[in-house]
Amino acid sequence: MDKIAKYQQIIQQLLQEYAAISSQESDIETQFIFDTERHHYQLVNVGWKNERRIYGCFLHLDIKDGKVWVQHNGTENEVGEDLVNLGIPQQDIVIGFHSPFKRQFTDYAVG
């Protein structure tokens, strides 16, 4: 299995695990948004809570230039660590929501 296919599989597995945790509200659906051709992966909450509309992406990962980019993390978990535990090396993970300057001070790739 090539690296990109492996990373796609790991990302989809991770998002399915996160979705299983987040789907505790009966009126809120967690949707998978997987664009496997362009390598974009999101989890989105859609629904209603107390007469209020709920809609928003709470996890967004991309694969760009052979690296997994964590574009948005609206969870309390350390997604980078989860990706490492599933087999993606730290040098292939970019915390994209940190500024390029700040990335150099993390244990992950800068871009």
Image (spheres, rainbow, N blue to C red):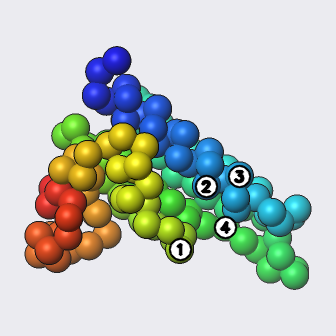
Q: Image quadrant of residue 102?
A: bottom left
Type of amino acid under label 3: Ala
For marks 4 and 3 on the same chain, the one whose residue lies earlier in the sequence: 3
Q: Is residue 8 left or right of residue 76?
A: left
Amino acid beneath label 4: Tyr
For the residue pair 93 and 38, the one nearer the viewer reads as: 93
Q: Which amino acid type is shown beneath numbered disc 1?
A: Glu
Q: From mark 4 to mark 3, how far is it between C-alphas?
A: 17 Å
Q: Residue at x 56, y 63 (%)?
A: 57
Screen quadrant of the C terminus:
bottom left
**In whole angstroms, how far apart are the C-alphas of marks 1 and 2?**
11 Å
- The residue drawn where x is 56% and y is 48% is 15
Residues at discs 1 and 2 in contact (Cβ within 8 Å):
no
Q: Nearer the viewer, residue 71 or 12?
A: 12
Disc 4 versus disc 2: nearer the observer: 2
Tell me which amino acid carries mark 2: Tyr
Q: Earlier in the sequence, mark 1 or mark 2?
A: 2
- For the residues bearing labels 3 and 2, Cβ distance under 8 angstroms: yes
- Circles 4 and 1, Cβ within 8 Å, touching? The answer is no
* Whether residue 30 is visible: no
Q: Earlier in the sequence, mark 4 or mark 2?
A: 2
Question: How many callouts does the rendering have?
Answer: 4
Q: CA distance from mark 3 to mark 2?
A: 5 Å
In the rendered image, which residue does mark 3 sit on? 20
The residue nearer to you, when weighing 6 against 46, is: 6
Where residue 96 sits, quadrant-wise, is: bottom left
Which residue corresponds to mark 1?
76
Q: Secondary structure at mark 1?
A: loop
Res. 55 mark: 4
